[in-house]
Amino acid sequence: MTIQFDYGILDAFNARSPSMDERQQIFDLWCEIANLDQYVRKFDHILKLYRFARDESRIRIAAANERRNEIAGVGRDAPEASELLAQCRILEKDAMMYRSWTHIAARDGAMTIYHLCHRMMTIWSKMQCCSLFDASKVGVTKELAERQFARAFPAFVTIRNSMTGLADNAAPPLHVDCCPIETAYFKSDVGLSLFFGGSLEGDTFQVAFDTHIHGYDLYEESLYALQELLNLIRKSFIDDKK
């Protein structure tokens, strides 16, 4: 359940705030926290775009495979084979476009997770410096949020760094390390040149960075984790007053 965050909260603070400076601090914090839900909404839209593009790509790949089976059945020299082949190529081209959209969504999702966490931690730091909040209570809540974020998205900083360093990662292999890598999906004993900027394995977006594979899941559970963190900072603003 989402914690309601309306102007009534400001009234309670203003009643205890003797100075305009304190009231301005509280209003600025309230605005920052109230605007955090744009990141959660954006991630929700990212998941919807990802699932739509993923499913559309799969539908077209399946249809293209059906066309190829039909071609195999009638023979390449049959009159209808050329039309079936043309349809197959269009379907495969569209499938590739939708597949590209899934990567766009996944990369934007990684950046959205990073920005939300960064903004939340900045807000908590400001709350700790505000005289109207109990710094020790805010600190405890902040540490709880950091642990929750680390469990839900253990490599979000590394993934973000990989995204912002695509040009560097695309440098010649001489400039990047090569090492043995093993994941649930592949194993390389001789190593890989780590210069690529992300790939999808199932519904998990993965990047190779600093000789390791890191990733996050494009699942509803990831959205729920962000919603829980948003509720946590809103609750902290309400409950961690002096």
Image (cartoon, rainbow, N blue to C red):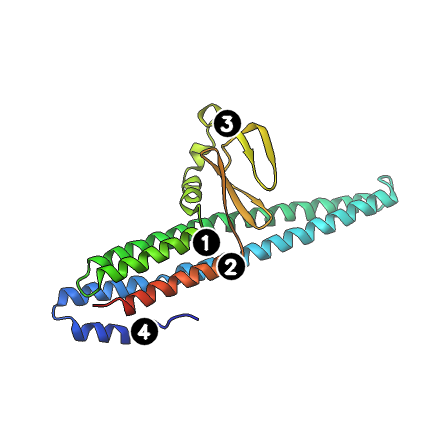
Q: Quadrant of residue 86?
A: top right
The amino acid beneath tag 3 is Cys
Disc 2 on helix, strand or loop? helix
Badge 1 or badge 4: first in the primary sequence: 4
Number of labels in the image equals: 4
Quadrant containing the C terminus in the rendered view: bottom left
Q: Are marks 2 and 1 in contact (CB under 8 Å)?
A: yes
Q: On the rendered structure, is 106 left or right of 168? A: right
Question: How far across and down, in percent of the image, does residue 216 sit?
Answer: 50, 49
Disc 4 on helix, strand or loop? loop
Of the residues tagged 4 and 2, which is closer to the observer?
2
Vertically, is 238 above or below 48? below
Disc 1 on helix, strand or loop? helix
Mark 3–mark 1 distance (CA, rounded to whole Å): 29 Å
Q: Are marks 3 and 1 in contact (CB under 8 Å)?
A: no
According to the picture, the residue beneath numbered tag 3 turns out to be 178
Q: Nearer the viewer, residue 24 or 4?
A: 4
Q: On the rendered structure, is 182 left or right of 168? A: right
Residue 199 in sight: yes
* Residue furthest top as drawn: 174
Question: Residue at coordinates 46% horizontally, 57% vertically from top-left?
Answer: 43
Q: Are marks 4 and 3 in contact (CB under 8 Å)?
A: no
Badge 2 or badge 1: first in the primary sequence: 1
Q: Quadrant of residue 143?
A: bottom left
Badge 3 or badge 1: first in the primary sequence: 1
According to the picture, the residue beneath numbered tag 1 turns out to be 152
Question: Which circle marks residue 6 in the picture?
Answer: 4
Disc 3 on helix, strand or loop? strand
Question: Residue at coordinates 87% horizontally, 41% vertically from top-left?
Answer: 75
